[in-house]
Amino acid sequence: MSALDELYRQVILDHYRSPRHRGSLKGPHIHAEGLNPSCGDEFSIDLIINDGVIADVATQGQGCSISQASGSMMTEAIIGHTPDEARALTDTFKRMMGIEEGESPLDPEKPGSVLGDLEALQGVKKFPVRIKCADLPWTTLADALDRSDA
Ligand code: ZN
C-alpha cells in the first residue's frame, strides 16, 4: 500500500468513527432517505436552507465505512454553500468516481485541492461494487435538492 493509499484509508476511517454533522434537525426544510440494497447501507439527510444557502445539515444512517464516511465528508463539503454549488460538487464527485462520464476533475499534482477529504474515496473506484456505497449519500442529497424550490 502506498503512503497516499494509507493516508486515504486513515481519512475514511476517521470520518467513519467520528461522523460530522450526525443526527437530525428540528423542522428541516428538506428530508430525504436513501438505500443501497447491494450492501445494506442506509442514509438520510436533513437540510435547512436559509437565504439561498445550505445553513445546516444533519445525517443519519448505518452501513459500511465507505457509505458513512462519504456522507460525513459530504456534510462538510456542502454546508455554507448554495444548492447549485452542492449540485456542482455532486457532479464533480461523480466524475471522480467514474459514475458520470467526463474527465477526472482531480489535480494529480495537488492531492486534496479539488475535493478535500472526499478525494480519499477515489480508491474505491477499484472496487466497482463499493462505488454505490460511496454514491449513496450523494444520490440522497440530489433527491433532497430536487424536492426543494432552491
Ligand atoms: Zn456499503
Image (tube, rainbow, N blue to C red):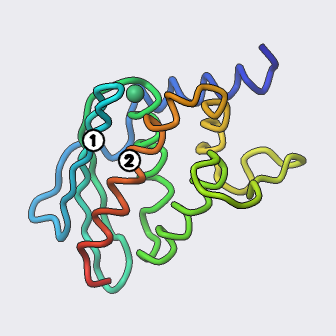
Farthest top residue? 1
Amino acid type at circle 2 is Pro
Q: Please give the count of numbered marks on the rendered protein.
A: 2
What residue does disc 2 label?
A: 137
Query: Is residue 111 found left or right of 58 in the rendered image?
Result: right
Mark 2 vs 1: CB contact within 8 A: yes
**Placement of the N terminus among the 4 image quadrants:** top right
Query: Is residue 3 found left or right of 11 in the rendered image?
Result: right
Image coords of residue 114 (percent x, y): 71, 57
Can you tell which mark lies on residue 43? Answer: 1
- Could you say which quadrant of the image residue 64 lies in? top left
Query: Vertical placement of 83 versus 138: above or below?
Result: below
Q: Residue at x 38, y 47 (%)?
A: 137
**Placement of the C terminus among the 4 image quadrants:** bottom left
Image coords of residue 98 (percent x, y): 64, 47
Query: Vertical placement of 70 versus 126: above or below?
Result: below
